[in-house]
Amino acid sequence: MQASVKWHHDNTFVGISGSGHAVVFDGNKDGSTAPSPMEMVLMAAGACSSVDVVSILKKARQQVLGCEVKLSGERADTVPKVFTKLHLHFEVTGISLSEKQVERAVQLSADKYCSVSIMLSGSVAITHSFSVKPADINMPAE
């Protein structure tokens, strides 16, 4: 896997993934125009885990219609201001979802599949929780 990050201006950088996708990073504290690198790490953990949870639920033939993960992170007070704690709370919406299956999907992601959070777990305390919401009948499938 390869990527590049190029300085654009001020504290703004553009990353280009090996697959050709561009992402803007902004290191400015005030007036930023894009997520900071640490915000990207936090979102990457959420995205990675969400991919797992949705995939596992679909394979379990669950009628999942929505999945949102709300992330919170605590950072060290001193430099380097690394993450010390992360919490991922999954809000899964669907039709007749099994709470047991959602719990299993979140646990499998945390313990076995999510490369990002498993990599971070070597130095960061990571916790997970979830809630299951019945689908609004008018909610379109994603």
Image (cartoon, rainbow, N blue to C red):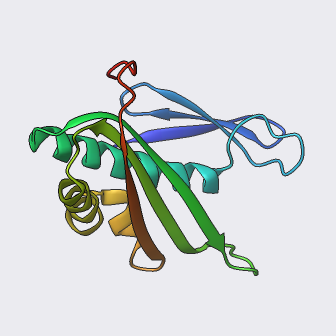
Task: Please give left or right for residue 97 compared with residue 137 in the image.
Answer: left
The answer to which of 4 and 88 lies nearer the viewer is 88
Image spot of residue 64 (x, y percent): 26, 36
Image position of 77 with respect to 58: above or below: below
In which quadrant of the rendered view does residue 47 lie? top left
The answer to which of 30 and 92 lies nearer the viewer is 92
Task: Please give left or right for residue 64 compared with residue 138 in the image.
Answer: left
Report the number of discs: 0
Residue drawn at x 48%, y 77% as measured from the top left: 124
Image spot of residue 65 (x, y percent): 31, 31
Residue drawn at x 39%, y 22% as measured from the top left: 139
- The outermost residue toward the right is 30
Image spot of residue 86 (x, y percent): 52, 69
For the C terminus, the quadrant is top left
Image spot of residue 114 (x, y percent): 29, 57
Image position of 106 with respect to 6: above or below: below
Residue drawn at x 25%, y 65% as measured from the top left: 107
Residue drawn at x 40%, y 67% as measured from the top left: 128
Image position of 123 with respect to 11: above or below: below
Task: Please give left or right for residue 32 compared with residue 106 in the image.
Answer: right
Image position of 39 with respect to 24: above or below: below
For the N terminus, the quadrant is top left
- The outermost residue toward the left is 60
